[in-house]
Amino acid sequence: MYPKQLNKNLIVHYDHCQQQRNLSITQIIKIIFNKITINESLIQLHNQNFVIPNLIIQFIIYLFYMSLVLVASKTCPHCIRVVLTLNHLKIPYELKYIDIENRPDWFIKASPLEKVPILFVGDAVLFESLVILDYINTLAPQSLLPKDNLQIALNRSRAEFSQEIIEILWSVFSAKTLEAFDLQMKELRWLFSSLESWLQQTKFISDNVLTLADFAYAPIFTIIPALKQFMDFDIFDGFPRLRAYIDTLHALPELKMSLVENYDQLIQKKIQSREPYFWKQ
Ligand SMILES: N[C@@H](CCC(=O)N[C@@H](CS)C(=O)NCC(=O)O)C(=O)O
């Protein structure tokens, strides 16, 4: 049975600690080594002397106890965005790659839509990459989301928009005739024009600083360079802001380390097997 099960008590401890403003250092050590019950820890909280901020406590406890298992496939942009965010936030996790064409039984049982990525958090299985991003963002000491609720919703809306771009991008790269290719390119350019206009207002997709929405987009723009040598058209023609934005994303050190070593070759193999119209011989 995969993956290993977590001790539920530890997660309870984690949740419990999240509710406290501060904990004493002895309290943390005791919780970490699981030596006391929650009731005891509640009583002892009143006698604390030395305190450290709750966020640090959450992180320490998380480092010790939260075991995350991400199930992914090597070329899946929805998966890479999760890997990238985990790496960026320096959150420890276990990564399990599966062959999506040959899904193991345990995966079919665990993944409600039989799609990657899924994230095991103890007994719970999270699915849908953007939901997973929202969750892992809560585990880190600093959030990648704005503070204002409306801005959070806006960020989420723009992240959601990336899902459509992935769909259309695959369609461009799978179109078998000139007619189908032109149609999908028109659609893609229409989507890109929204990105271009957002990027006229802010440096990143939804803000002037890097936010969770940018992590949703970054892997999309690793597909195109992998195929560049086979494309005799410029997919970003007429979108200067988008081009600059993509350069900024590519400069993120975690992006490269979130890809498998032979990522470009795997993407090329995957797309070439579809015998698309655009493929330059
Ligand atoms: N909306 C999902 C999409 C996930 C998705 O489409 N995953 C692809 C790989 S990139 C998959 O598992 N495809 C298998 C299938 O559709 O059968 C998410 O954001 O996680």
Image (spheres, rainbow, N blue to C red):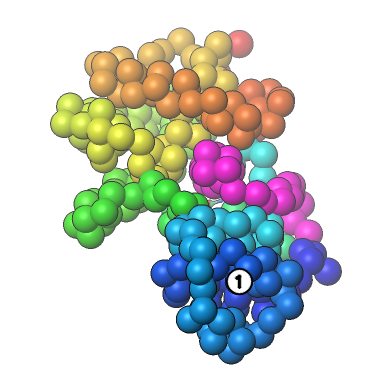
Q: Nearer the viewer, residue 221 or 179?
A: 221
Residue 88 in the image: state x and y as whole percent: 52, 39
What crowding class fits label 1: few (fewer than 14 Cα within 10 Å), some (14-19), or many (20 or more)?
many
Q: Nearer the viewer, residue 12 or 238?
A: 12
Residue at screen point 65% across, 49% down: 92
Left or right, 66 with respect to 151, comes to: right
Q: Nearer the viewer, residue 101 or 12?
A: 12
The quadrant of the picture occupied by the C terminus is: top right
Residue at screen point 72% across, 74% down: 34
- 88 magenta-colored: yes
Left or right, 63 with respect to 180, comes to: right
Whether residue 125 is visible here, answered yes or no, is: no
Q: As displayed, is residue 29 above or below residue 207?
A: below
Q: As displayed, is residue 273 above or below residue 113?
A: above
Q: As displayed, is residue 184 above or below residue 4?
A: above
User: Which range of residues does the magenta coloring cover?
Assistant: 77-104
Whether residue 62 is visible here, answered yes or no, is: yes
The quadrant of the picture occupied by the N terminus is: bottom right
Q: Quadrant of residue 197?
A: top left
Residue 31 in the image: state x and y as whole percent: 65, 72
Read off the residue under disc 1: 27
Label 1 CB less than 8 angstroms from ligand 1: no
Left or right, 140 with respect to 123, comes to: left
Q: Amino acid at mark 1?
A: Gln
